[in-house]
Image (spheres, helix red, strand yellow):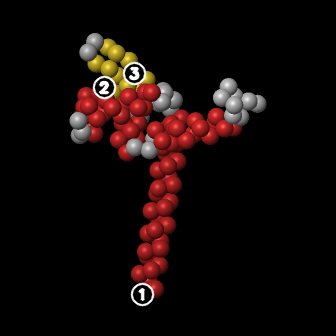
């Protein structure tokens, strides 16, 4: 099957994945997504939890929004953000498990190294 840009559907999927991983490739964006796990929050709430400038939070939310990872809802003077697709949390959880496995492996190597000294 061919896409409109001359590539295959498989090419489009890899392009999508690369863009998704680039979007997730910023620690503040990852922290924002984790903060949104329980539900919607305002920029002010996120800014307070992150302890960074509101403009930085807004900039990172803009990137997440432009890549369709979060939705915004305006109510009065507040803008509330939520994660569009909760499957993103599965991806983040898998990344955490990979990290924990690597830490465990490094700890095992350190322990084995100490025992051999």
Q: Secondary structure at mark 2?
A: strand
Mark on residue 117? 1
Say whether residue 9 is visible.
no
Distance from label 1 to label 3 (Cα)?
57 Å
Q: CA distance from mark 3 to mark 2?
A: 9 Å
| Numbered-mark total | 3
Q: Read off the residue under disc 3.
A: 72
Circles 1, 3 touching at the beta carbon (< 8 Å): no
Between the C-alphas of marks 1 and 2, the distance is: 53 Å
Q: Is residue 46 left or right of residue 96?
A: left
**Mark sitting earlier along the chain (3/2):** 2
Residue 96 seen: yes
Q: 10 Å neighbourhood of mark 3: few (<14), some, or many (≥20)?
A: some
Q: On screen, 34 above or below 1?
A: below
Say which residue label 2 marks: 42
Counting residues from the start of the chain, the first of labels 1 and 3 encountered is 3
Which residue in the rendered view is the most extreme toward the top? 76
Identify the disc placed on residue 27: none
Seen at 50% across and 49% down, the residue is: 95
Quadrant that contains the C terminus:
bottom left
Task: Locate residue 96, reporting x and y percent.
Answer: 47, 50
Hey, which residue is sitting farthest right in the picture?
1
Neighbours of disc 2 within 10 Å: few (<14), some (14-19), many (20+): some
In the displayed structure image, the side of residue 79 where residue 108 appears, left or right: right
Say what secondary structure mark 1 lies in.
loop
């Amino acid at each position: 099957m061919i896409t409109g840009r001359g590539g295959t559907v498989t090419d489009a999927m890899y392009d999508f994945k690369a863009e998704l991983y680039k979007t997730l490739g910023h620690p503040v964006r990852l922290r924002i997504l984790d903060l949104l796990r329980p539900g919607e929050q305002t920029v002010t709430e996120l800014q307070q939890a992150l302890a960074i400038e509101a403009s930085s939070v807004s900039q990172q939310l803009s990137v997440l929004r432009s890549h369709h990872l979060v939705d915004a809802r305006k109510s009065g003077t507040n803008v509330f953000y939520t994660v569009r697709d909760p499957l993103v949390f599965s991806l983040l959880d898998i990344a955490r498990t990979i990290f924990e496995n690597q830490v465990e492996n490094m700890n095992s190597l350190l322990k084995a190294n100490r025992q051999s000294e």
